[in-house]
Image (cartoon, rainbow, N blue to C red):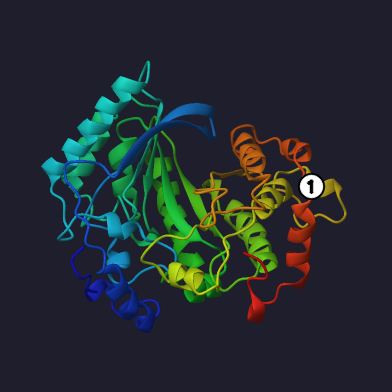
């Protein structure tokens, strides 16, 4: 990709030294991408406030997240897949949408009720997806029941959300919050906004929802399980606390826990290469889901009383060294239990999986310290 540079908008945000180093690391990526082809598209199932439904997920190929092009988050390498030059025009974006619709027509019996649109940045950022393109995309999917749109909180406003609710589409804004702890978000993730900014974005969405006549609008918070520089036990505690704090914000009805995976051209990749980072255990992901499911309140030793919000997780790269993993013997079973829970919300599924490596995981939780992490690979 072309050497990224910070614009006025990004200056003075995050760790400047980290951003300078990451701009150089990201510029090593020399692959090119077709602006008329989406980055990814697939069909799946998702749990929503209205129940489990078929979904069409689209990752648009844009000019890239403006924060990532300035240096960006310690774990995110998606900007390396963005189009050369930092901009994709309206016609090319609509060509990408057409490719996705053709894919859906070829692989599904009928249009999916739920459409999720990501850019690995901010769909609501005019530099990535302009107002004309957003209006056209809203019209294209006006026959669907629900749409999810990815954005950083500072690009969220009621008018942009109304572009979709005006078409009678229930609209959810997916915000990459990563953690409810400002210190962790700033020092471990290098994300520049605060939890208060997330609350403000939720307020904008609530206002849009109140003004909508036939549709609703809500927020789906994306949290990062085990950012760099946290031990396994610290990551678990921070995730449980973050889920509880997100659920307490009016309008945030879903929390998606994303276990950190090691992506190329990132600080996490550099740490991993030198033995300074291990992705989270799948046991940790299952533990958090069980603790926050709502049935844990009867257990005096529980770390959470459970939450009313929908909590889901779909570990990327599960079972691989670069993704959330256990010992290798039980990874597939535990991953399957996590996906089962994410669709049905029943924590009893975790009682059906076990492995001797749980003892190692428990020892890691007890003995791992920040100055000697990670204890295992």
Q: Nearer the viewer, residue 67 or 106?
A: 106
In the shown orientation, is residue 332 left or right of residue 43? right
Q: Is residue 98 above or below residue 371?
A: above
Estimate the x, y position of residue 241 in percent, counting from the top left.
66, 61
Which residue extends farthest top? 109
Q: Is residue 80 above or below residue 174?
A: below
Name the quadrant of the N terminus: bottom left
Q: Is residue 282 above or below residue 194?
A: above
- Count residues near mark 1 (Cα–Cα under 10 Å), then give few for <14, some for 14-19, many for 20+: some
Q: Nearer the viewer, residue 59 or 311?
A: 59
| Secondary element at tag 1 | helix
In the shown orientation, is residue 183 left or right of residue 105? right
Q: Quickly name the residue at label 1.
A: 296
Quadrant location of residue 169? top left
Q: Nearer the viewer, residue 131 or 45?
A: 45
Quadrant location of residue 56? top left
In the shown orientation, is residue 348 left or right of residue 175? right
Q: Nearer the viewer, residue 349 or 256?
A: 349
Estimate the x, y position of residue 60 in percent, counting from the top left.
27, 45
Which residue extends farthest front? 329
Estimate the x, y position of residue 360 in percent, counting from the top left.
76, 60
Q: How many marks?
A: 1
Estimate the x, y position of residue 81 in percent, counting from the top left.
28, 54
Instruction: Judge whether residue 56 can be spotted in this image.
Output: no
* Residue at horizontal 16 percent and vertical 51 percent from the top: 88
Instruction: Judge whether residue 207 can be spotted in this image.
Output: yes
Q: Is residue 85 above or below residue 165?
A: below
Name the quadrant of the C terminus: bottom right
* Residue at horizontal 55 percent and vertical 48 percent from the top: 318
In the shown orientation, is residue 159 left or right of residue 286? left
* Residue at horizontal 28 percent and vertical 78 percent from the top: 11
* Residue at horizontal 54 percent and vertical 66 percent from the top: 227
């Amino acid at each position: 990709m072309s050497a990224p540079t910070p614009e006025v908008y990004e200056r003075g945000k995050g760790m400047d030294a980290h951003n300078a180093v990451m701009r150089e690391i990201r510029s090593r990526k020399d692959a090119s991408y077709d602006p008329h082809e989406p980055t990814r598209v697939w069909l799946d199932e998702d749990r929503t406030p209205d129940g489990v439904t078929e979904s069409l997920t689209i990752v648009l190929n844009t000019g890239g997240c403006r924060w990532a092009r300035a240096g960006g988050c310690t774990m995110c390498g998606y900007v390396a897949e963005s189009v050369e030059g930092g901009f994709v025009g309206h016609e090319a974006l609509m060509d990408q949408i057409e490719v996705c619709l053709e894919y859906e027509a070829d692989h599904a019996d009928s249009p999916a009720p739920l459409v999720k649109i990501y850019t690995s940045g901010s769909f609501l950022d005019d530099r990535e997806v302009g107002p004309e393109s957003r209006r056209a995309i809203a019209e294209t999917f006006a026959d669907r029941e629900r749409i999810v749109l990815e954005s950083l909180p500072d690009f969220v406003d009621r008018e942009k959300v109304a572009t979709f609710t005006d078409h009678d589409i229930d609209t959810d804004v997916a915000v990459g919050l990563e953690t409810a702890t400002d210190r962790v978000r700033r020092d471990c993730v290098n994300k520049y906004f605060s939890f208060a900014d997330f609350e403000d974005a939720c307020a904008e969405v609530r206002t849009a929802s109140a003004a909508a006549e036939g549709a609703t609008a809500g927020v789906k918070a994306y949290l990062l399980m085990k950012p760099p520089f946290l031990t396994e036990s610290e990551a678990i505690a921070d995730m449980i606390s973050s889920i509880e704090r997100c659920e307490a914000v009016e309008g945030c009805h879903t929390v998606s826990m994303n276990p950190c995976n090691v992506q190329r051209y990132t600080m996490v990749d550099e740490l991993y290469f030198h033995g300074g980072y291990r992705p989270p255990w799948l046991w940790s992901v299952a533990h958090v889901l069980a603790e926050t499911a709502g049935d844990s309140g009867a257990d005096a030793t529980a770390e959470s009383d459970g939450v009313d919000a929908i909590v889901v997780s779909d570990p990327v790269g599960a079972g691989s060294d670069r993704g959330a993993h256990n010992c290798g013997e039980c990874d597939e079973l535990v991953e399957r239990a996590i996906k089962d829970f994410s669709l049905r919300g029943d924590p009893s599924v975790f009682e059906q999986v076990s492995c001797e490596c749980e003892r190692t995981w428990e020892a890691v939780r007890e003995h791992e310290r920040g100055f000697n992490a990670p204890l295992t690979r």
